[in-house]
Image (spheres, rainbow, N blue to C red):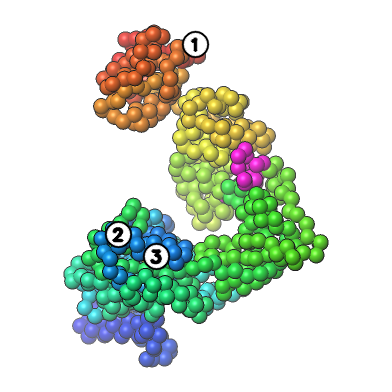
Amino acid sequence: MSGPTEETLLRAEALKAEINRHNYLYHVLDAPEISDARFDELFLELQRLEEKYPSLRTPDSPTLRVGAPPLAEFVQALHPSPMLGLENAMSLEELADFDQRIKKFLGMEEDLVYSCEPKFDGLAVELTYEGATFVRGSTRGDGVTGEEVTANLRTVRSIPLRLSGNPPPLVDVRGEVVMLTEDFRSLNAMQEDRGLPPFANPRNAAAGSVRQLDSKITAERKLSFFAYGIGRLEGETPSTQEEAMDIISSWGFRISENRKTVKGIEAVAEFCNSIERLREKLPFEIDGCVIKVNDLALQTRLGEKSRSPRWAIAYKFKPVQAVTRILDIVPSVGRTGAITPVAHLMPVQVGGVVVSRATLHNMDEIERKGVLIGDTVVLQRAGDVIPEVVRPLTEKRDGSERPFVMPKACPECGSHVVRPEGEVVYRCEGLDCPAQIKGRLRNFVSRRAMDIDGFGVKLIEQLVEQKIVRDVADIFKLDKETLASLERMGQKSAENLVNAIEEAKGRDLARFLNALGIRHVGEATAHALATRLGTLEAIIGATKESLLDIEEIGPEVASSIVEFFSDEKNVASIRKMQSLGVNPAPLSYGGEASPLAGMTFVLTGSLARMTREEAKESLKRLGAKVSSSVSSKTSYVVVGEDPGSKAKAARELGVPILSEEEFASLLAGAKKPAPVAFAGSGAANAGKPPAQGSLF
Ligand code: IVH
């Protein structure tokens, strides 16, 4: 097929420019010039041309706003410079302290000029424009790395696909994706119509909509973008924050209409108070104000601390409160087994959102606040926080109120509910608890645990919802036919998955323990347990005392392990796995047991080649224990520069001493697979050093 004619090319370009302009007039300026019907006509004309000539579909084409084919997963996006967070000022006093601090830092007496604006309560994103075209968008993530969500952000109408005015060759624009309160209400009404759960607040709705693998879903959600800053910028740079905002606006972005540049912290406080009064009238949710030093040269001088700049602060509003009645308190089991008492309330408006549930956190909190079922209570919603009960209005009691009692058995599965020593949270420890099963399965199959390739979240959901998998052990019952009958699962994937499950049956003990999801037992503890106790049976039968002998394990972790294995249901589930062929392999180094298992090392003096932390880490990895005092049970004392009294103690007790050099070659040798000296180190030799000479 021949390409588009010159005339078609020009028409497509004109349509794109025209549509983008009307889009800007409607979504950024809120001042449309044409009817929706006329807009649709233009859009359809462009869509038809692009269908005929796909080469016309450039990255700035407005037709991309309807969404792209779904992604399998998000790609990580490293921010060219970190997207820092903000320090909070919870009161006007803290705001004044901030002003004092920076004046002192700069050695300035005179009033500083600040650029102030509302703090949007949404999801922070970064948009990259190359040659004025929107090429990449990512979420803030942890500030250093986010997720690439370009296709999703293209669907947001107030994000220009092409910059207007006098754009630079390269710029990163930063800002917040929010859902207007009105759009949030209609979305929740629609969710209800479809029998879907409502979103808790506009922020969650915005974040959930941006983080969709299918951008067609994002396109259905009405989202808005407000720009508030610049990341990288090639070309002319502004000299103040105010100027930067004007430039951003000239490129076609929506910025806060309520921003203001003021002199002195008193004027800042006035601004904050005025915005707080305006809060309920704004079309979107805000949770405070952001105050930035206006002069960009001063911003550079002030620099940043590890996670936030010194030149800006977030002034947080007081939370919004309301009064209502607690109809009931219901225990709710979370994915990790934590049981949270949830107050079911007489529905009430708090800061523009209807609230009918509030968390009471835990039993201690209920007792501390003295909350009873039937109480009239003060309710609070603070920005992104789930509504919480602040206090009961005891004067409103009529005697019918009654206390909440935590059930002894899990309301979801009947397993016993425990309150681990030293903790405030009650937990259900049942391996087959349906409320927890999805979370447990996710952990079980994850890469750092049993590493079952192809066992994704969607599959877990199907398996649990169709009751094919009721506990982790059921994974090992899955066969090709069952898997192939599931949605989105072909014969080949089913076969691959069955093979992956088969392979997982022989994963090592450390991975298996990590996979069980025992509270407080992560990768490192699982590894320590596996190297020190050697077999699954030894771990199941371990007492608290024997666990405490392991250096990495403290009382809280030891109790949690004992508690886990004392639940018959958990042991039964493990037995079921074993009967299905699961046989966790002991940790091996080239087929042999950990080379330094059972040995205890003491380090003294400073080491030149490595830090003490590194030395400890290497020893632990090889199965050795590191102790701080020398005894007759010590296998070796490693002596560095300026050793302390420990070297002397070693000589007195006849404990072998290693120089740093010898120690380094011991580590190097031990890391090689199966050194001969350790091949036969059975129980009789445990704790004793192998014969000198064979070590190196
Ligand atoms: S400026 C280096 N301005 O607040 C600081 N941030 O804790 C750059 N936020 O997740 C941020 N409204 O997304 C700035 N007008 C505003 C903002 C704002 C909301 C968010 C931002 C970030 C958080 C910082």
Q: Residue at x 56, y 48 (%)?
A: 439
Q: Residue at x 27, y 22 (%)?
A: 641
In the rendered structure, the answer to whether residue 274 lies left or right of residue 474 reads left
In whole angstroms, how far apart are the C-alphas of marks 3 and 2?
12 Å
Q: Residue furthest right?
A: 399
Give the x, y percent position of residue 500.
Answer: 47, 41
Which residue in the structure is indicated by mark 1? 684
Residue 552 in view (yes/no): yes
Secondary structure at badge 2 equals helix
Which residue in the structure is indicated by mark 3? 96
User: Callout 3 environment at 10 Å: few (<14), some (14 to 19), or many (20+)?
Assistant: some
Quadrant housing residue 396: bottom right
Give the x, y percent position of residue 304.
Answer: 30, 56
Quadrant (top left/top right/bottom left/bottom right) for the N terminus: bottom left
Query: As rendered, which of 693 and 221 lies closer to the eye?
Result: 693
In whole angstroms, how far apart are the C-alphas of marks 1 and 3?
69 Å
Which residue in the structure is indicated by mark 2? 104
Query: As rendered, which of 465 and 643 lies closer to the eye?
Result: 643
Q: Residue at x 43, y 88 (%)?
A: 36
Give the x, y percent position of residue 510.
Answer: 48, 32
The disc, 2 or 1, on the residue closer to the chain's N-terminal end is: 2
In the rendered structure, does residue 499 fall within the stretch colored magenta?
A: no
Quadrant housing residue 127: bottom left
Give the x, y percent position of residue 416.
Answer: 70, 41
Looking at the rendered structure, the kind of residue marked 2 is: Lys
The disc, 3 or 2, on the residue closer to the chain's N-terminal end is: 3
Write the start and end of the magenta stretch as one range: 418-438
The disc, 1 or 3, on the residue closer to the chain's N-terminal end is: 3
